[in-house]
Image: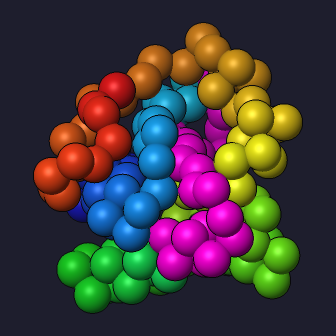
Amino acid sequence: MNSFDLARAAAAAADHRGARDVVLLDVSEILTICDVFVIASAPNTRLVAAAADEVEQQLFVEHGIKPAAVEGLDARRWVLLDYGDVIVHLFLDEERDYYRLERLYSDAPRLEWVPNVAGGSAAN
């Protein structure tokens, strides 16, 4: 599985568990540490944790992949799941508004993805 497929799978898992405004940024030409950022948010810490759990579970069950590191799960305001070439950022809404990663990496192309749940986030 390449990094773009992995990012799409992570996005679908987060979307399935209620994360919203899911965005995939191709940062491969900007950063050397990874290829793709998956960025999503939720209105409360419970949903941030649920989305993080769903991403971890789905990527392990479906693809046998575990994150190399997980940060921020205790506070559940900005959870980072490090899958090497893919970094998943799950924010509490106000944290996402504050840090504005999409603006910081505005020169990174957005990747298309299709939610697998009716009524999910719009593809970007």
Most extreme residue toward the top, as rendered? Answer: 107
Q: Is residue 35 magenta?
A: yes
Q: Residue at x 49, y 70 (%)?
A: 51
Query: x, y (%) of residue 100?
Result: 75, 30
Left or right placement of residue 100 versus residue 36 in this view: right
For this view, does 117 lie left or right of residue 4?
Answer: left
Identify whether 53 is placed above or below 124: below
**Which quarter of the rendered picture does the C terminus lie within?**
top left
Is 46 one of the magenta-colored residues? yes
Asked whether 47 or 114 is in front, the reply is: 47
Q: How many marks?
A: 0
For residue 6, what is the image quadrant? Answer: bottom left
Q: With respect to residue 16, does 24 lie above or below?
A: above
Q: In x, y percent, where is residue 40?
A: 54, 48
Q: Is the residue 22 above or below the residue 30 in the image? A: below
Q: Is residue 71 visible?
A: no
Q: Quadrant of residue 49?
A: bottom right
Picture residue at 62% right of the left edge, 56% below the top:
43
Q: What is the span of residues highlighted in magenta in the rendered image?
A: 30-52
Q: At 27% from the left edge and 87% from the top edge, which residue is drawn?
A: 61
Quadrant holding the N terminus: bottom left
Residue 98 x/y as whole percent:
84, 36
Residue 73 can be seen, yes or no: yes
How far across and how far down the image is residue 87, in percent? 58, 54
Q: Nearer the viewer, residue 80 or 28?
A: 80
Its colouring scheme is rainbow
